[in-house]
Image (spheres, rainbow, N blue to C red):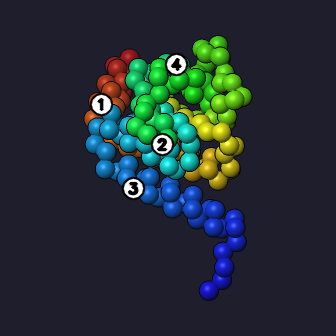
């Protein structure tokens, strides 16, 4: 049996974590459970220190959020409202000027918009002290798509989308 290269081993590790997180996300039923489960899972997937899933209304961009679900690694503590906004800004998800960008001492952050039927419904962001590899960034983006799909299956978003479609057809 051939020995895997360090790259292959690292890639396999990230893919295994992505697979496990995606499978566990399937068990969540409503949008609150999907969002909180996603915040918990993305910490392990990306080996981050902080994670947030922020949900807002349907739109073409992410400019506000109504609810957030967050987690800090190594415990059950959630982020404060200010920490949520700071992480979203550091990940480049909030509009310019919404909040000052994260200080260098806090480390890098990455984020992804959550979309359903082409409409932005929220965002997913993580942060830690070390840079993210390209493989971790890609796994994060794929997981973001999985979160969007899981949210799409929840009744709240499906009902809202159907309402939007009815209004658009009426005009």
Check whether the beta carbons of the residues at disc 4 and disc 1 lie within 8 A of each other: no
Q: Quadrant of the N terminus?
A: bottom right
Q: CA distance from mark 1 to mark 3?
A: 22 Å
Let me know if residue 118 appears in the view: no
Q: Is residue 132 left or right of residue 41?
A: right
Pick whichever of labels 4 and 3 is earlier in the sequence: 3
Q: Residue at x 68, y 43 (%)?
A: 130
x and y percent of residue 111 in the render? 58, 35
Label drawn at residue 82: 4
Check whether the beta carbons of the residues at disc 2 and disc 4 lie within 8 A of each other: no
Check whether the beta carbons of the residues at disc 2 and disc 3 lie within 8 A of each other: no
Pick whichever of labels 1 and 3 is earlier in the sequence: 3
Q: Nearer the viewer, residue 95 or 108?
A: 108
Q: Is residue 160 left or right of residue 61?
A: left
Q: Residue at x 66, y 74 (%)?
A: 4
Label drawn at residue 23: 3
Q: Nearer the viewer, residue 165 or 63?
A: 63
Residue extending furthest toward the top: 97
x and y percent of residue 117 in the render? 44, 36
For label 2, the SS is loop
x and y percent of residue 118 in the render? 48, 34
For label 1, the SS is helix
Q: Quadrant of the C terminus?
A: top left
């Amino acid at each position: 049996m051939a020995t895997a290269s360090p790259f292959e081993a690292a890639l396999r590790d990230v893919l295994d974590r992505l697979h496990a997180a995606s499978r566990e996300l399937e068990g969540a039923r409503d949008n609150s459970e999907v969002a909180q489960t996603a915040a918990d899972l993305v910490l392990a997937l990306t080996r981050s220190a902080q994670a947030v899933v922020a949900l807002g209304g349907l739109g073409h961009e992410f400019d506000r959020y109504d609810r957030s679900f967050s987690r800090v690694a190594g415990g059950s503590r959630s982020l404060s409202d200010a920490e949520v906004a700071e992480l979203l800004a550091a990940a480049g998800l909030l509009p310019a000027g919404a909040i000052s960008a994260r200080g260098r001492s806090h480390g890098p952050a990455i984020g992804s918009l959550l979309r359903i039927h082409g409409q932005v419904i929220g965002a997913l962001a993580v942060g830690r002290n070390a840079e993210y590899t390209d493989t971790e960034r890609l796994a994060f983006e794929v997981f973001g798509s999985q979160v969007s799909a899981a949210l799409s299956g929840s009744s709240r978003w499906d009902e809202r989308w159907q309402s939007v479609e009815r209004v658009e057809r009426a005009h």
